[in-house]
Image (tube, helix red, strand yellow):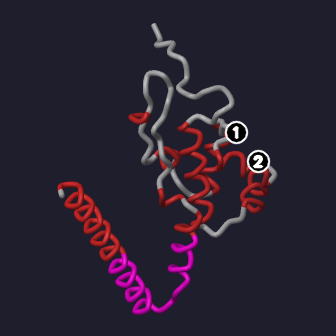
Amino acid sequence: MLNQEKSPSKKGKPHDVDIHVGGRVRLRRSALGLSQDQLGAAIGLSFQQIQKYERGANRIGASRLYELSKILHIPISYFFEGFSDAGLSETGDSSYQPNPVMKRETLELMRSYHQILDSKQRKKILKLVQGLAEESQREGTDKKQDHKSKGRE
């Protein structure tokens, strides 16, 4: 007999998998440089419908997911990569957090980076960003250690 548990999604709130799949649509669309208008036109939908899909407000049916995979040149499994329902509790509450790679700022950074034609310049920018990230991590570690040592005084 099938397990007939209720969906972990609360009424009126998008399900975590819908949010994740929509985010993956947005990530791939942005990586290809397509607007919501262009993607919508390719599958016969308005940009508003694409927006709703990307936010997870509307679920994407199996046939539409298939169409999107063909237009975006990816396997259907791409939409579910990185999703785990491990964050779902018995009560349906979720600790699910979308992947930070799907943020607009990250997508814009990736797109701009790939528009730099000179590979030497791209490598310099990569090293700069890596250096800033390392410095930020060190500063964060230092602040945590300072906070801990002040608590012992």
Q: Residues within 10 Å of mark 2 (few under 14, many from 20)?
A: some
Q: Secondary structure at mark 2?
A: helix
Q: Which stretch is magenta?
A: 108-132
For this orientation, the residue located farthest to the front is: 153
Q: CA distance from mark 1 to mark 2?
A: 8 Å
Q: Position of residue 21 (x, y in %)?
A: 56, 45
Task: Check residue 54 for magenta coloring.
Answer: no
Q: Amino acid at mark 1?
A: Asn
The disc at residue 49 is 2
Sequence-earlier tag: 1 or 2:
2
The reply to whether the C-beta atoms of the residues labelled 1 and 2 are less than 8 Å apart is yes
Q: In the image, what residue occupies the spot 44% across and 47% down?
A: 81
Quadrant in which residue 60 is drawn = top right
Quadrant in which residue 17 is drawn = top right
Task: Check residue 128 for magenta coloring.
Answer: yes
Q: Position of residue 111 (x, y in %)?
A: 56, 74
Q: Main secondary structure of the magenta part?
A: helix
Check disc 1 and report the residue beneath it.
Answer: 58
Residue closest to the eye, 131 or 149: 149
Q: In the image, what residue occupies the spot 46% across and 13% down?
A: 3
Q: Position of residue 138 (x, y in %)?
A: 27, 71
Q: Amino acid at mark 2?
A: Gln
Q: In the image, what residue occupies the spot 61% across and 47% down?
A: 22
| Quarter of the image with the N terminus in it | top left
Quadrant in which residue 90 is drawn = top left
Q: In the image, what residue occupies the spot 66% across and 36% down?
A: 61
Classify residue 140 as left or right of residue 59: left
For this orientation, the residue located farthest to the top is: 1
Q: Work out whether 31 lies above or below 20.
A: below
